[in-house]
Each structure stands twice: as C-alpha cells, then as structure tokens.
Amino acid sequence: MLRKRQGAVYPLSVRALYRFLKSVRLAVVVILLLTGLSLLSTLVPQGREAAWYLQTYGPALGALILALDFDHYFSSVLFVAPAFILALNLGVCTVDRLARRLHAKAEKRFGPDLVHVALLVLIAGAVATGLGRQEKFFSLSEGEQLPVNSHYTIKLLSFEYQKYQNGMPKAWISTVEVRKDGILQAASVPIRVNHPLRLGGLSLYQASWDNRSTFLFRDQSGAQAVARVGDAFRDGDTLWYLTDTTGVGAGLAAVLQQYRGTKLVSERKLAVSESLGQYTLAGITPRMATVLQAVNDPGFVVVVVAVVLLAVGLALTFVQGRAARTGGGPPPSTR
C-alpha cells in the first residue's frame, strides 16, 4: 500500500517507521531505560575480576552480571544499543525539523535544532568514553620517575599526606616534575584530589597513598628481621599487625594492632628501641608513596563541545522565544 504526499510516493511501512523513529514517546522510553540502567550500574562495582562477582553476588546473579557485561556497563550492549537508538531518534527529528524550517516562510529559529545537535554530540562523547576509556594505577616514591605514555614522563618530587586530628585523611598532594620527550615541561606541579594534571589527552588523578616503610626488629637472641606495613607476628595467642607509621623525625613510631582470633583487642605505638614481647624495634625506614590514576578518555573533548553547544542552543532558544512572545508570535518548539 502506498501513500502520496507533496508529489512523492512512500510505502506506508516506511512512513510508519519514520514516524516511529522521530516520535517523542520513543525518546522518553529510551531515556528512561538509559537512566534506570545507569543508576543500576552504580550499584555494581565495575571492572572487577569475574570470580569477584560470582563470590559476591552468588553463582546465579554473578553469572547474569557477567553474561550481560554489566561489569563493564558503559561498553556493553545494554548501554550502546539504547544510546544508538536515542541518537537515531534525535538525528531523524533534527533532520525533519531542519527540513521543515528551511521550507517555511516564517522566521528561522534554530535554537532547538542546536540543542538536538548538542545532544547527539553528547551521546557520541558518552559512547566514545564507554568504548575507549583506559585507566591504570601506579605508585611512586619520592625521587622515582615513570613514563605515563609514549611522550610524557613524571618524577615525584614530594608527597604530602595530611590528616585530621582524629586520624582521618584530609589531603593527598603529589608534586611532580613533567617531561615530554625528555624536555622539561613543568618543574613543579601539584596533583590534588579532584584537581588532576592534564597531559594532552591523558589525565592524572590523585587516587590514594601507599606506606612502603620498613621496620627492623631484633629478637632476644639478637637475630634481625625486616617487616613492612601489612606484616604480622605472633606473640603467644596474639597476632600483632603492622598497620602504619606515625610521627616524624625522632618521634617516628610504628602503629600496631593486636588481634585475638578475629577480634581487635588494642592498638599500640612502638617507638625505636621499645620492645613488644620478645621483639625490639631497632629501626624504621620511612617511605611514603603516592598512588596515581592515569585516565585516557577519548570522549572528554567531545562532551565539552556538546556542553558548549547545548548552552548556546538553550540561550538562543530562550532569546528567540522571548522575542517571538514580545512580537506576538508563537514560541519555538523544542522538537
């Protein structure tokens, strides 16, 4: 069956498909689907080992998460397919609006069309991020350097770990030297939480810290042993865990936690030359390390462009709509 419109003949099935692709209902359903799945994905930690999901969520639910690629949601079909449908919907709608406006005799108002284009660019940026985002973690101690990609190398000049009086973390600050292809680019740049260092398309985030300090112990026979944070030794029915260091200079001490079975009994600070059971702390070599996260996000620039286009489109829509209302004309449609 055919239908004729404006001198052209279209199959009825093509017309129905065209109306479906540019419908508001389709956009609403897909947006709700994307929103729901995206919120659900925040409840599932991303990028863990397969065994972790099976152990944490059980065999059935864990297998379902892995089968649906919900452990990598933003690169899965569950995200890419609805995003593609939404992009197709916005694209058809935008072309339809532009075609009608170009043939209309009324004043041309392209603000809503620019909003549609911005949303298309935003979807493209989100898909590019989901499919192409790469990240890795690495740790550095003072004086160490590391190539973060084929061009840039950083060297850790200093690392500052600030705490509140109750011992909770306050700030982590890594000061680094940056070289590109061996040439000094920045002699001293701080990297703070929520204040990353951007090197071309790469972003370096302050992620955490690592205590690499070593502790020298002597037993009653004079034998020596070197321990690190995370190590433990037994004293009767007690296990003592080395958890941290505290203080500076002459006041530097090891922090140990006492466990009986799985129960935390006490916490103690052990200074150099002090004893704990049959062991005496002979020395501490403090060594703090920063943990940085390198992120390569190919969609970042695309998303920035989309946000700029969206702001311009909304502003243009507002200005043109206000002018139309002042002049007595109808406000522009957003679809």
Image (cartoon, rainbow, N blue to C red):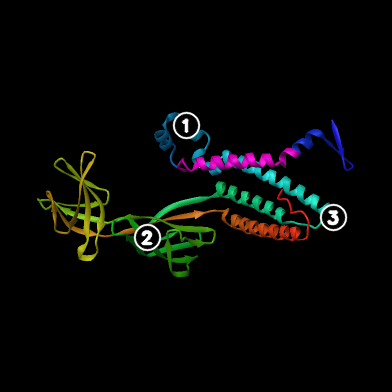
Q: The disc labelled 2 sits on which kind of residue?
A: Ala
For image coordinates 49% across by 35% down, the residue present is 66
Per the image, is 107 magenta?
A: no
Q: Earlier in the sequence, mark 3 or mark 1?
A: 1
The location of residue 8, given as percent across then percent down, is 87, 41
Q: Residue furthest right?
A: 7
Instruction: Say few, some or many: other residues with alpha carbon within 10 Å of mark 2 (under 14 / 14 to 19 / 20 or more).
Output: some
Residue 291 to residue 260: above or below: below
The location of residue 205, given as percent across then percent down, is 45, 57
Q: Earlier in the sequence, mark 2 or mark 3?
A: 3
- Magenta residues (range): 19-46
The location of residue 99, given as percent across then percent down, is 80, 50
Q: CA distance from mark 2 to mark 3?
A: 61 Å
Per the image, is 24 magenta?
A: yes
Q: The disc labelled 3 sits on which kind of residue?
A: Lys
For image coordinates 51% across by 50% down, the residue present is 134
Q: Quadrant of residue 21 in the image?
A: top right
**Which structural element holds mark 3?**
loop
Numbered mark located on residue 105 in the image: 3
Query: Residues at badges 2 and 1 in contact (C-beta under 8 Å)?
Result: no
Instruction: Say few, some or many: other residues with alpha carbon within 10 Å of mark 3 (under 14 / 14 to 19 / 20 or more).
Output: few
163 displayed left or right of 118: left
Foreground residue among 322 and 104: 322
Residue 30 to residue 170: above or below: above
For image coordinates 37% across by 60% down, the residue present is 171
Residue 148 seen in render: no
Q: Residue furthest top?
A: 60
Q: The disc labelled 1 sits on which kind of residue?
A: Ala
Which mark is in front, 3 or 1? 3
Q: Which residue is mark 1?
A: 63
Task: From the image, give the main secondary structure of the stretch colored magenta.
Answer: helix
